[in-house]
Image (tube, grey):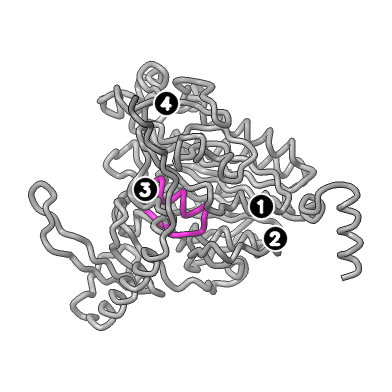
Amino acid sequence: MKSIAVLAALCWSFGSLASCLAADQPNFIIIFTDDQGYNDLGCFGSKKIETPNIDRLAREGRKYTSFYTACSVCSPSRAALLTGSYPKRVGMHKHVLFPQSDYGLNPAEYTIADHLKSQGYATACVGKWHLGHHPETLPRANGFDSYYGIPYSNDMNHPDNKGKPRLPSDELWANQASAIEIWNTPLFENEEIIELPVDQRTITRRYTDRAIDFVKSNQDKPFFLYLPHSMPHIPLYVPDDSYDPNPANAYTCVIEHIDAEVGRLADTVRDLGLSEKTYIIYTTDNGPWLQFKNHGGSADPLRAGKGTTFEGGQRVPCVMWAPGRIPAGTTTDAFVTTMDLLPTIASITGSQLPSEKKIDGVDISSTFETDHSPRNELIFYSAQGVLEGIRMGDWKYLSKVKTKGKNKPAGRERFLFNLAKDIGEQENLIENESAIAAKLDARMVAADEEITGAARLVWKREAVPAN
């Protein structure tokens, strides 16, 4: 206690207490791609895509094979990662935001960036935000010191999402200049549009340039970098030196370009001597957009992809790297979600989260060295925020609304899978294990009732009175 008092006195003399106490804390980099499949990395089994830099992070770190996002589409997934909460708990569960949307993540929520900033960290968001494009909902309102990136998906147009091209993906790939000739996606610096349209051919590289500048500028103090790449969400673009005109290789080109840029950033951390005090987490917001074929990825051996509550929609690749803190060359099947990152980061930094904000994440730092996770369940909501399922332990139960003509409801289709034996969700055990299904259904409903009853409000723009 005496030494802490002396340290506090020195901090009072030479700067803020938070900054001084943070001096020896580790750095955190979260790299979050868009629509990347479970099978779209070499270290996760891809036979087509070469990702030597991310594979190196896996060799030097730990691969997570049961890592989940909280939703199968962009905005809810991102809200969950940053707040440690189910999207429904923070009101961000009803599909994705568009340029004409009048709501966004409430700045009253408590994010990873809010928490680390309160601990004296420098914080930056570089990339796709997609939690609201109004100034009140952009990154600087949610704990980040700076923002550089696009506010929503790269297939959305400023200001009202009108005028979007209706061209085949192969045709867009063949005409890389369409990035600026057809699309009207904005690039933001903090709250201002600085480029319209953004040149998507170079955006992955420019994100990395900004990320590297941030790391270099803050190498002498702890930092948090959130790097949500806007690729490989369609439309796909790359710089000239990464371009293959064969559209069959479009998706491969984009992932391999991302890998090269991840390598540049990781090498910067190594070259600055920051390896043993930096955590790098690489993952993605949801599974692959399979309907776009060679412009979408692969979730093999999982079932389905983006937009579904099958494993291919929400079980995603994840690599965690922290030399000296996470054992090298290891793999775990521990049950983990993006919601667990906030409480885990708080645990690593020895800091407390505010008790007034209930969250759904748990501290999974035990999984760095063991296969034991304190998480035992995950509630599954559809892309529209409808309750659809639950995983408890190795069992996964889904109750999905069936539809017929014009999407009219036609009862429910129920599934029960043992993921330990059937990762591809091919054997429906609903008839043979009805007692287990009933137990899971009851728990799913009870959990949803609690989340719904305690849900917090999103930020919503007030209507402008008519003159």
Whichever of callouts 1 and 3 sits on the residue coming sooner in the sequence is 3
Q: Is residue 78 magenta?
A: yes
Whichever of callouts 3 and 2 sits on the residue coming sooner in the sequence is 3
Mark 4 touching mark 1, by CB under 8 A? no
Q: Is residue 133 above or below residue 270?
A: above
Q: Please tell me how crowded label 1 is: few (under 14), some (14-19), or many (20+) other residues with Cα within 10 Å.
A: many
Give the CA separation, mark 4 to mark 1: 30 Å
Reading the image, the residue beneath label 3 is 73
Residue extending farthest front: 467
Q: Amino acid at mark 1?
A: Leu
Residue 349 is labelled as: 2
- Element on which disc 4 rests: loop
Give the CA separation, mark 2 to mark 1: 9 Å
- The residue lying toward the viewer, choosing from 139 and 45, is 139
The magenta span reads: 69-86
- The residue lying toward the viewer, choosing from 404 and 296, is 404
Q: Amino acid at mark 4?
A: Thr
Whichever of callouts 2 and 1 sits on the residue coming sooner in the sequence is 1
